[in-house]
Image: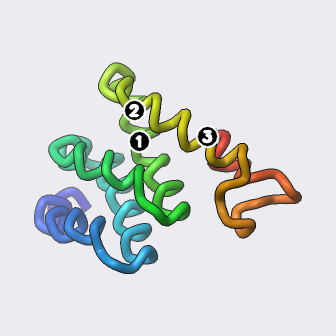
Amino acid sequence: NTEMIPAISPIVFKLLTHSQEVVRKKAVVSVCKFFKIVPDTVLDNKDTIRMVLCDPDPSVMGASLHVLFEMAKANPGGCKDLVPSFVNILKQITEHKLPRDFDYHRMPAPWLQVK
């Protein structure tokens, strides 16, 4: 809820650099929910969110696309510098550089392509 977010957000933002990808992914999902409730909390840590976009694990990177999508909807001009990163991610997906686990009927990660 709104009262808890300022108290737990520093802990969640620290978890974005955790060694296990499952923890990082859950932290990104939490940050997305934080942004929907209290956008200023996430916008204060915008650089940390941008670093998660370059995460070596594709599931964490895919989860970060949801947060960045919400941020871009709220302020399109603030995310223009991320366009090369988005294009690079799309290129990696279409060239089948993600693990086969992300393929759906031989289509490489269609949900990430759409996002």
Residue 27: % across, % down: 35, 67
Contact, mark 1 vs mark 3 (Cβ under 8 Å): no
Q: Answer left or right for 109 relative to 26.
A: right
- Residue drawn at x 48%, y 56% as measured from the top left: 61
In the depicted structure, whether residue 107 falls above or below residue 13 = above
Q: Amino acid at mark 3?
A: Leu
In the depicted structure, whether residue 34 falls above or below residue 24 = above
Q: Secondary structure at mark 3?
A: helix
Contact, mark 2 vs mark 3 (Cβ under 8 Å): no
Q: Answer left or right for 67 relative to 89.
A: left
| Residue farthest toward the top in the current orientation of the protein | 77
Q: Residues within 10 Å of mark 1 (few under 14, many from 20)?
A: many
Q: Amino acid at mark 2?
A: Leu
Q: Amino acid at mark 1?
A: Leu
Q: CA distance from mark 2 to mark 3?
A: 12 Å
Q: Which mark is residue 90?
A: 3
**Mark 1 — residue?**
68
